[in-house]
Amino acid sequence: DVKVTQSSRYLVKRTGEKVFLECVQDMDHENMFWYRQDPGLGLRLIYFSYDVKMKEKGDIPEGYSVSREKKERFSLILESASTNQTSMYLCASSLRQSTDTQYFGPGTRLTVL
Amino acid sequence: AQTVTQSQPEMSVQEAETVTLSCTYDTSENNYYLFWYKQPPSRQMILVIRQEAYKQQNATENRFSVNFQKAAKSFSLKISDSQLGDTAMYFCAFILTDSWGKLQFGAGTQVVVTP
């Protein structure tokens, strides 16, 4: 079974703090993704990566950056957290092709005060 | 831009009954895939079923089946013999074949199965 893990289930940060969300997958997947999930909006893609050190912007990249130094790990960074970044963040990975099934982590509920 | 619409925010169904969730999408492209994902209260999103647009036959997975109407751009999910464990948020998702993995999700439908 594919396993995607995220570093925290719940996180509370203050406005202006730098926040790191980490995601690890154990199935040698090439593609990794970060989404945010908000009620009534479904999931929206923030960034994705199709190879180590490669990254592409998704639909809502503003205020976020990412890092992928190793194949199994994909980090989402909030350089200066703001209250409108309070959300559920989901990481996903897929094998190789653009249409391969994406496997999701359990999510991180981030609250920015 | 592609959009995915789920018009039912919440649906309730009794155990052993059948429920159908609607999903429509908008695209001018021909080559794409469609998915239904399930997110139970524990939050881990899992794949329920997937459908390739070039396949006319509707996909099935145990008690889950889809009704794919390409011309109408409709992709509904039917859950038969509903079980309490089917209580979850269900998301319809769409991806173009050449889109670098950019899944487009609908807003979701909350399904509540009652005893």
Image (cartoon, rainbow, N blue to C red):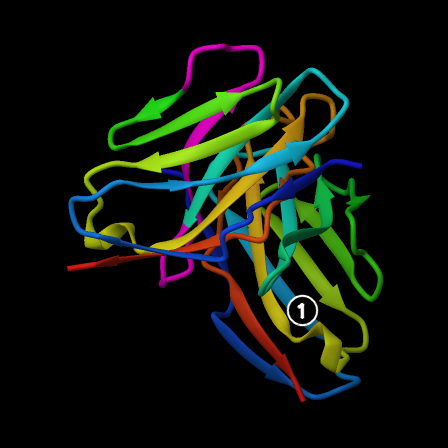
Task: Please name the predominant secondary structure of the magenta segment in the image.
Answer: loop
Residue B53, quarter of the rendered image: top right
- What residue appears at the point 41 percent right and 27 percent down from the top-left corner? B66
On the image, the x and y values in percent for residue A29 come to 55, 34
**For residue A76, above or below residue B53:** below
Query: Label 1 neighbourhood size at 10 Å, few (<14), some (14-19), many (20+)?
Result: some
User: Is B46 a magenta residue?
Assistant: yes
**For residue A22, above or below residue A51:** below
- What residue appears at the point 19 percent right and 39 percent down from the top-left corner? B81
Mark 1 residue type: Phe
| Quadrant holding the N terminus of chain A | top left
**For residue B23, above or below residue A112:** above
- What residue appears at the point 51 percent right and 61 percent down from the top-left corner? A107
| Quadrant holding the C terminus of chain A | bottom right
On the image, the x and y values in percent for residue B14 come to 20, 53
Mark 1 lies on residue: A20
**For residue A42, above or below residue B99:** below
On the image, the x and y values in percent for residue A75 come to 66, 57
Which one is in front, A105 or B102? B102
Report whether A34 appears left or right of B27: left
Residue B74, quarter of the rendered image: top right
Q: Secondary structure at mark 1?
A: strand
In the image, the segment drawn in magenta is: B39-58
